[in-house]
Structure formats: C-alpha cells, structure tokens
Image: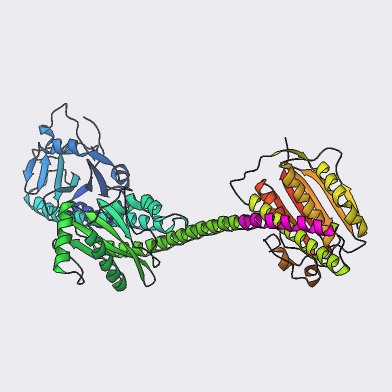
C-alpha cells in the first residue's frame, strides 16, 4: 500500500474559491475533517480545492493522481446513490491505492471509519463525461456516514459538479483568451520589415490554438494601382485554392464586414452576410463540405476606412460555436494585420521604385555613353581639319575664328571624354581589377603634368607624405584621374597667390589622400549636392569658372566602386578639403 496525493488543482484555477467553499461546507455541515475537490487534467486528476487543517492543505493542494489508478480503485466501490464508498476490506493487499492516508486509529463498532476507507462523489458534465471528484475523509464521529449524512453529501456533490463545470469552462475561456492575446501580440510586435507571409508563419500556431481552429488563411487584395500581393496565404505556407468566383465573393463580403466592423460566422446553419446571393450561399456551403470544415470565422482585415483582405479560421463539424469573445479578439487581430499589409505594400512599392530607378540609371548611363561616343568621331574630324586650316596662311579674322572653333571643339572633346568615363565607372559590367598602387607616385605624376599651370597662376603646392609608402588597392588609370580632378578643381577655385596641399597617410586599413586649397570654399547647402552629375555651385564666383560639373562626380564614383569613401570639409570663403579613403594594399 502506498501513500498517495489527492487529486486537485492549483490556486490559479478559475472558480477554485467556489469549490473551496463547497469543500468547507462538507467539513462544517456534514462533519468531516478533510474534504477536497479534484478536476480532470488529461489522464490525471489534480486537486483544486481543499478544506481541513493547514498541514493537510499543504500536502494535498495541487497534487496529481493518475486517472487510471483512481478509476481502478473505484471499481471496487459500493454505490450510495451519487456517492461511491470503497471499504478498506475490499482492497486487495497488493493493490496500489490513491489518496492521502490519515494517521488515525479506528473506533470500535461495525460502522467504524477505517483510515483506508474512501468516500467520493464523481462529478460529471452535461454529456456524462467525468469532470472531477469530490472526496471526503476522517468523519468527526469516526463512523461511516448514515442515510441523512449521505443525502446532504449528495446535495453538495450536485453543487460541486455544477461548480466544476463552470470552473473548467472559465479555465478554457481564460486559456483561449490568453492564446488569442498572445497571437494578437505576435502580430502587433512583428517588425515593420516583415511581410504578410512571415507574420502569418510566426503567428499561425498561436492563432489556431487561441481560437481552437484547425486551419487558417489570409486573402490579401491588390492595392489601388493594381499591385500588391493579391493572393491567399495559408498558415502552413501552402497555397489555398479557392474557386475564382468565391475569391470575388469573399472580397465583397470582407469590404462590407470592414465597413460595419463585424466578424461573421460561416457554416451551413449560418451562411452569413446579407450581401450574398442564394448562389453565393450554395457555393460557400459546398466549399465547406469539400474541405471538411464545419464552420469558419470570417474576419475582415483593414486599416482606417480601407478593407485590405480577410482572415479565415476554420473548425471541424461538431466543434464548439464561435464565442463573442473570440469574435472581438479576431476583429482586433484584423486591425493589427491591416498594419502588416500596409507595411508590406509600402515595402513592395519601395522595391518597385528602387528597381525603376536602377533601370533608369542604367538607361541614363547607356544614353550618356552612346551620345558621347557619337560625339567623339565628328569632334575628331573637326579638330583634324582645324589643324590643317591653322597650317594655312589666312587673314586675321579667319585665324581668330579658327582658334575659337579649335578651343570649343577641344572643350567638347573633354566633355565627351568625361561623359564616357562617367558612364564607364557607373557601369556594373565594368568591374574594378585592383592592384597595389603607390599614391605618392601618382601625386608626383599629376603635379608634374599640372605644375606649369599652377605655377603660372602663382599657386604654391605642398606635398606631405610619410616615410613609408602609402599603397592602395586600385586601378592606376582611375586613381590618376581622381588625383588629377582634385588638383585641377583646387587650382580652378583658388585665387592667385593661394596654396594647394596634398597629404598622404595610412589610417587603420585605409590609404588616405587629402587635397586642401585656400580657395572660394563651398556652402553647406552646396556640399549636399556636390557629387551629383552636372551640379554647379550656386556661388557666383564659382559659376564664373568654366566647367561641366562632372569632375567631382567622377571622383566620387571611382572611389565608391573601389570600396572607398569620399569626404569634404569646407567653409565659404576659407577653402576646402577633399579626402579620399581607399582600401590599403596588403
């Protein structure tokens, strides 16, 4: 024989207070030192309420007993109306018994209560299912209860059965609300970048458990411009196939339900929605039969005045009806899912816009390259014939005109070269093939080529570099163009007598080239657009200098495609510093 725990529940069980009052009534009115109520938990009985001394309460409350062991012992019971009495003499010596065994000695007489006696009343639900057990032990007079005591105990058992049913229903509802709330929180807390599929996948289990559903799917409408998801997303990420006409019927019903802020139940008994025709109803009912669904909860999804889709939760035939609490919770989720759909649409629009801009940028690059290429040949012919004319003896007027044409043609040729280079460095089909490049050598070569024009303008040039070589991973020709454009830019906007300083350094894993001038400087507003193609400064002094606005844009693109960064620091009237950072070699 083993000592056992009584069946019961913990203090968090809804309705436990009422069950405790019933147990206390048994002890006070009928005269027992211990009474307890247990509720069925799957294949166990759990104690939810205990009346008696504090030590007894501590031992029994919340304990569990295997239901099979309990029922096996009750098969030996004598039936006293709704009560079952198991006398100790009926228990086989080898049988494991359930329950708490009091440490008391029996009184004298044939009706004496033995510590191994057991008296209980099974508590049944509306359909006869076992819900729990009312048990009592240690009568005050030490004797088995007589007929009058049994009658009173039967009345308490009837009350306990009703209270147990109410407690279990409240418990199920509380769990249902908890799970529905959990699903709602999952939807509400979903990161803004998640799409409908990800949110449905993350919340599907909680949705179906919280609403006691066996299936779930969402229909999302196309957005106003004909884009959007426009499809059905299932909880298990499979495609749900609805007849085409039912898709349109569901969309129409969802818009009407959202306008009225209502959730509809769809079943053979409740075909829902006054907006449906008799044909609609027939097709819906046939569809439910085809997918073996007894009923479904039809939830509109929307935001503000706009219906965006619908959520469908399904139950099999014979399942409980959808409660008002479930409908209210589902409508809240419809509002939360509306936010998700709007976010998904926003991201889809942004994605489409990015693709369109990328396509436009590619087209622009190809157009620039094509136009520049087509300009090169006639410009070359013009310059060649101008050279022939310059060798001929002509009058002063013709000579002056030929020289002007030559200057214009060569300027156009430089613009065409810049446009071709701009298109090349912006084309992903022309990747960088880097190799180690000593930036000091590049600076020396550029200054040797441009030294004459700098000296003619009276601009001093200072080069600062460390003792160790500053070697970047880059394409030599493109980096030469970067340095040339920066130095030319500094010369153009620095007045006579100014200074240009070129500084080289290595910082962490970057080779750094700085070009600083004492020129006009750049306003903060202009700095924000400085690297855009064809941008010219709004400063009238800067606009007076010739240029196309492509030099710094070419610098920026070359540096970016090498995995580097371009920085600018400038104050109007105080000069500028352009800083280029490139991956260091080795």
Q: Is residue 263 above or below residue 318?
A: below
Query: What span is in magenta?
Result: 368-390
Q: Is residue 206 above or below residue 540?
A: above
Q: Position of residue 199 (x, y in %)?
A: 39, 54
The residue sitting at the top extreme is 94
Query: Relative to the observer, which residue lies in front, 172 or 485?
Result: 485
| Residue at 36%, 66% in the rendered image | 302
Residue 208 located within the stretch drawn in magenta: no
| Residue at 63%, 58% in the rendered image | 371
Quarter of the image for the N terminus: give it.
top left
- Residue 181 in sight here: yes
Q: Position of residue 96 (x, y in %)?
A: 19, 31
Residue 428 is left or right of residue 26, and the answer is right
- Residue 115 in sight here: no
Q: Position of residue 331 (x, y in %)?
A: 32, 65
Q: Is residue 563 above or below residue 519?
A: above
Q: Main secondary structure of the magenta part?
A: helix
Q: How many marks?
A: 0
Query: Relative to the observer, which residue lies in front, 482 or 206?
Result: 482
| Residue at 65%, 43% in the rendered image | 432
Query: Relative to the observer, which residue lies in front, 265 or 370?
Result: 370
Residue 68 is left or right of residue 49, and the answer is left
Residue 378 located within the stretch drawn in magenta: yes
The quadrant in which residue 60 appears is: top left
The quadrant in which residue 328 appears is: bottom left
Report the colour scheme.
Answer: rainbow
Q: Position of residue 451 (x, y in %)?
A: 89, 52
Quarter of the image for the C terminus: give it.
top right
The quadrant in which residue 152 appears is: bottom left
Query: Relative to the observer, which residue lies in front, 155 or 304?
Result: 304
């Amino acid at each position: 024989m083993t000592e056992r725990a009584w069946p019961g529940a913990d203090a968090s069980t809804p309705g436990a207070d009422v069950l405790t009052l019933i147990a206390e009534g048994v002890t006070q009115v009928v005269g027992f030192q211990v009474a307890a109520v247990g509720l069925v938990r799957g294949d166990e009985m759990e104690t939810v309420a205990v009346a008696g001394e504090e030590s007894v309460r501590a031992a029994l409350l919340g304990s569990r007993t295997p239901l099979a062991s309990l029922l096996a012992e009750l098969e030996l019971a004598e039936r006293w109306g709704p009560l079952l009495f198991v006398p100790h003499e009926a228990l086989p010596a080898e049988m494991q018994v359930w329950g708490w065994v009091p440490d008391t000695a029996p009184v004298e007489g044939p009706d004496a209560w033995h510590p191994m006696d057991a008296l209980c009343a099974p508590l049944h639900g509306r359909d006869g299912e076992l819900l729990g057990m009312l048990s009592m032990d240690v009568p005050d007079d030490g004797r088995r209860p007589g007929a009058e005591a049994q009658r009173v105990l039967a009345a308490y058992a009837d009350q306990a059965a009703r209270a147990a049913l109410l407690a279990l229903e409240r418990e199920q509802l509380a769990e249902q609300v908890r799970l529905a709330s959990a699903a709602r929180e999952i939807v509400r807390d979903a990161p803004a970048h998640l799409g409908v599929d990800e949110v449905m996948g993350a919340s599907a289990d909680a949705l179906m458990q919280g609403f006691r559903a066996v299936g779930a799917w969402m229909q999302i409408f196309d957005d106003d411009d004909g884009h959007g998801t426009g499809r059905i997303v299932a909880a298990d990420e499979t495609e749900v196939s609805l007849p085409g006409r039912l898709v349109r019927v569901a969309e129409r019903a969802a818009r009407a339900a959202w306008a009225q802020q209502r959730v509809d139940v769809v079943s053979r008994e409740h075909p829902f929605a006054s907006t449906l025709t008799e044909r609609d109803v027939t097709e819906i009912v046939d569809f439910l039969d085809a997918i073996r669904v007894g009923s479904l909860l039809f939830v509109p999804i929307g935001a503000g005045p706009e219906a965006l889709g619908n959520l469908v939760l399904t139950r099999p035939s014979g399942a409980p009806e959808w409660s008002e609490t479930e409908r209210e919770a589902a409508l809240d989720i419809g509002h939360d899912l509306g936010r998700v759909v709007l976010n998904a649409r926003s991201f889809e629009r942004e994605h489409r816009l990015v693709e369109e801009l990328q396509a436009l940028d590619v087209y622009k690059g190809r157009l620039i390259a094509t136009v520049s290429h087509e300009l090169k040949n006639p410009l070359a012919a013009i310059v060649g014939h101008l050279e022939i004319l310059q060798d001929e003896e002509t009058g002063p007027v013709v000579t002056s005109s030929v020289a002007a044409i030559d200057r214009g043609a060569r300027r156009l040729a430089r613009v065409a070269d810049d446009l071709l280079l701009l298109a090349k460095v912006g084309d992903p089909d022309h990747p960088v093939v880097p190799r180690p490049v000593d930036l000091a050598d590049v600076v020396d070569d550029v200054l040797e080529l441009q030294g004459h024009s700098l000296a003619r303008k009276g601009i001093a040039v200072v080069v600062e570099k460390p003792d160790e070589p500053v070697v970047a991973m880059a394409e030599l020709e493109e980096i030469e163009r970067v340095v040339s454009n920066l130095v030319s830019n500094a010369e153009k906007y620095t007045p006579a007598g100014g200074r240009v300083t070129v500084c080289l350094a290595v910082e962490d894993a970057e080779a750094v080239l700085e070009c600083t001038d004492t020129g006009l400087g750049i306003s903060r507003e202009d700095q924000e657009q400085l690297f855009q193609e064809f941008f010219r400064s709004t400063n009238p002094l800067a606009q007076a200098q010739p240029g196309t606005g492509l030099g710094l844009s070419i610098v920026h693109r070359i540096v970016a495609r090498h995995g580097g960064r371009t920085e600018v620091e400038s104050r109007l009237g105080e000069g500028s510093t352009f800083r280029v950072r490139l991956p260091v070699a080795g």
